[in-house]
Amino acid sequence: MNLTSITVRRLTTEMLTPFTTSFGTQTHRDLLIVEARDDAGTVGYGECVAGAEPTYSEEATSTCEVALAEYVLPRLQNAAVEHPDDISTLLHPIKRNNMAKASVEGAVWDLWAKQQGISLSQALGGTKSRVDVGLSIGIKPTDAELLQAVGEAVEAGYRRIKIKIAPGRDLEMMRAVRREFPDEAIMVDANSAYTLDDAQLFAALDELNLMMIEQPLAHDDIVDHRHLQAAIRTPICLDESIHSLDDARKALELGSGKIINIKVGRVGGLTESLKIEQLCRESGVDAWCGGMLETGIGRAHNVAIASLDGFTLPGDTAPSARYWAEDLITPEVTMHNGQIEVPTGPGLGYEVKTAMLESLTTQEFTVQLR
Ligand SMILES: O=C(O)CCC(=O)c1ccccc1C(=O)O
Ligand SMILES: [Mg+2]
């Protein structure tokens, strides 16, 4: 691929509205943007989706910055990279640090697609020209505010609405939502806030006809989830518990859930995501593309992979305007009729606003690869 250098930029972007989950409230993203360059000067972009603190998983922006500088990028120096798949092979000896790995692998995938003159969707084997979009709504202080947010999401045309839950903001709140929206495609996401002691709560949620319950139990568990899934009718969707193809295979084999949320960063990149997509497709398991409040760069990666057949359900790939006053890409990601059009231009298919990216950058470093 004639890779010549990798640049890592750190920047902070203010979110339009705070986003609350069972593990905390986010008001901004503290993130890394990775640029992969070749000898012709072509640039591929990737985004590190880790949070500012290690509260969703063990990774955080600072740990990813260190992992990239000290361990990940040195392994790419003087390496023969012919295809983006080679990146995951080269990085395989490094355990976990998946979001750090995925950020550089994503940049190399974008660069590779640009070198081939094809879209990232096409490079990945995508077939859809539009992807179905779902919205993830954070925990609101009152039911009234939540009902209003759900009403706006229905109005906007989202094809599925996900609502965050946490102890104290769960059953009564969701009953209120169901009373007002009896027929909408609604699901909940607990971000691992519960234990098997809460089995009664999940039995009660079973009556609300939810599409799925995402990650109800511990972030590192697939055994308790198996017991919970055996006790309830609503499908469990695994998010935090799945870090690889092997994790997905084992969880499905155990019956720990019936749906997989594929997040590119959490599983270490697009190459691993493709393997999980194939597993789900071949075994008839529904999958969808998760989100991590990405800027347009990470969002464009998500839209590209969501265009594969195995992504059978709407993903958390809401349009730019849901998150940002101004996005890092142009045109920004927009939604029509609850769908996003998959771009057909080379690579991500959106232009990165390089002046904006540079002006937001607070720290950067470049590693020469040859
Ligand atoms: O809109 C999005 O990007 C999805 C938001 C979301 O649900 C989320 C955001 C940050 C961390 C974890 C999660 C999650 O899916 O669990
Ligand atoms: Mg989740």
Image: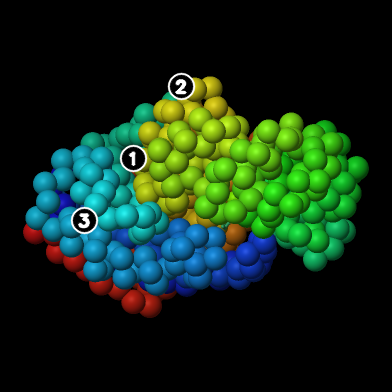
Whether residue 221 is visible to the viewer of this picture, yes or no, is yes
Q: Earlier in the sequence, mark 2 or mark 3?
A: 3
The three-letter amino acid code for the residue at tag 2 is: Glu
Q: Earlier in the sequence, mark 2 or mark 1?
A: 1
Are there few (<14), some (14-19), or many (20+) residues within 10 Å of tag 3?
many
Name the residue beneath numbered marker 1: 271
The three-letter amino acid code for the residue at tag 3 is: Arg
Circle 1 SS class: helix
Mark 2 to mark 1: distance in Å?
Answer: 17 Å
What quarter of the picture does the N terminus occupy? top left
Q: Which mark is residue 212?
A: none
Return the residue found at the far bottom. Answer: 362
> How far from the left and from the top, in percent, is residue 348?
38, 45
> How far from the left and from the top, in percent, is residue 23?
63, 64
Q: Which mark is residue 282?
A: 2
- Image quadrant assignment for residue 112: top left
Q: Which mark is residue 37?
A: 3
Report if the CB atoms under discs 2 and 1 are less than 8 Å apart: no
Are there few (<14), some (14-19), or many (20+) residues within 10 Å of tag 1?
many
What quarter of the picture does the C terminus occupy? bottom left
> How far from the left and from the top, in percent, is residue 288?
55, 37
Are there few (<14), some (14-19), or many (20+) residues within 10 Å of tag 2?
few
Q: Is residue 63 left or right of residue 214?
A: left
Circle 3 SS class: strand
